């Protein structure tokens, strides 16, 4: 399996709840592939599920690993990371992950800039929200060069100005339903919009999204 959704000039929308779980090389660990370069290496974005008591073999991250814990508790030899934890393991790092009670993760592999060497751990349940534009609240998670990653909380009924995405935009809907003139995107939906794409987003109910901007195909 290879070259899945790797054309960054095209918009991709996937409701991950409707996708099948697929096996990984290790028992008890399954995944839903959102984008992938090759079977077990290279660029990949996935939803990954660890059954209770499962573990993954020790491995390295040649170009980094980015994780958001969606439910349960994810662990490795460095600590335990409950639901709501944002993790960045920089290029060249390695670990041996496991989950005692089981967990579900949003995982991006081998997508760091070569000089992005920060190790990041943010518990989003205790980190502070900041005031954003209009009624939005923003929780910055990471910034490097042109890339910015944050949680954004939309209050019910909020509408944002029409805007373009320089360097693209990637969203995972964590709760509620995110909307724009192109459609409605319920919890679990992954959207990737290309460089200079444009939309007019809004919500009807309180909605929280994980957002990354500036990282898609501007070179």
Image: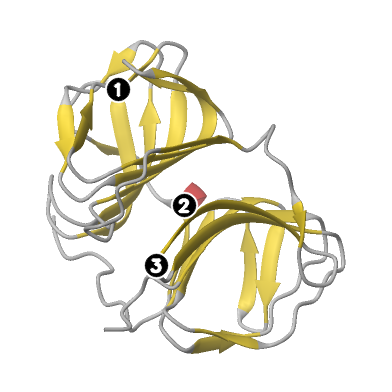
Say whether marks 3 and 1 touch (CB < 8 Å): no
Q: Is residue 25 visible?
A: no
Say whether marks 2 and 1 touch (CB < 8 Å): no
For image coordinates 25% across by 70% down, the residue present is: 6
- Mark 3: few, some, or many residues within 10 Å (few <14, many ≥20)? few
2 or 3: mark nearer the eye: 3
Tell which circle, 3 or 1, labels the residue nearer the N-terminal end. Answer: 1
User: Which of the labelled discs sits on residue 212, or is there none?
Assistant: none
108 vs 86, nearest the viewer: 86
Q: Which residue is mark 2?
A: 16
Q: Can you say whether 73 is above or below 68 in the image?
A: above
On-image quarter of the N terminus: bottom left
On the image, the x and y values in percent for residue 74 come to 43, 23
Q: Which residue is mark 1?
A: 97
In the image, taking residue 159 as reference, residue 77 lies left or right, namely left
Q: Can you say whether 204 is above or below 165 in the image?
A: above
User: Which of the labelled discs sits on residue 145, or is there none?
Assistant: 3
Q: Secondary structure at mark 3?
A: loop
On the image, the x and y values in percent for residue 122 come to 54, 36
For image coordinates 20% across by 30% down, the residue present is: 94
CA–CA distance in space, label 2 to label 3: 29 Å
Q: How many marks?
A: 3
In the image, taking residue 44 as reference, residue 203 lies left or right, namely right
In the image, taking residue 92 as reference, residue 134 lies left or right, namely right
Q: Secondary structure at mark 1?
A: loop
When asked about the image quadrant of residue 114, the answer is: bottom left
On the image, the x and y values in percent for residue 165 come to 51, 82
Tell which circle, 2 or 1, labels the residue nearer the N-terminal end. Answer: 2
Q: Is residue 119 visible?
A: yes
For image coordinates 68% across by 33% down, the residue present is: 125
CA–CA distance in space, label 2 to label 1: 23 Å
């Amino acid at each position: 399996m290879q070259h899945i959704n790797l054309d960054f000039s095209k918009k991709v929308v996937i409701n991950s709840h409707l996708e099948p779980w697929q096996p990984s090389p290790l028992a008890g660990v399954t995944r839903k592939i959102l984008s992938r370069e090759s079977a077990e290496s290279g660029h990949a974005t996935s939803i990954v599920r660890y059954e209770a008591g499962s573990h993954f073999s020790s491995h390295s991250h040649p170009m980094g690993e980015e994780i958001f814990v969606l439910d349960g508790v994810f662990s490795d030899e460095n600590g335990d990371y409950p639901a709501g934890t944002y993790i960045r393991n920089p290029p060249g790092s390695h670990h041996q992950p496991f989950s005692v009670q089981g967990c579900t993760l949003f995982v991006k592999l081998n997508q760091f800039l070569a000089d992005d060497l920060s190790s990041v751990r943010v518990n989003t349940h205790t980190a502070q929200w900041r005031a954003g534009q209009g009624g939005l609240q923003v929780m910055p998670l990471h910034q490097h060069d042109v890339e910015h990653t944050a949680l954004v909380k939309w209050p019910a009924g909020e509408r944002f100005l029409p805007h373009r995405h320089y360097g693209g935009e990637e969203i995972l809907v964590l709760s509620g339903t995110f909307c724009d003139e192109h459609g409605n995107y319920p919890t679990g939906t992954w959207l990737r919009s290309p460089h200079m794409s444009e939309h007019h987003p809004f919500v009807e109910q309180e909605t929280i999204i994980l957002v990354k901007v500036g990282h898609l195909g501007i070179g």
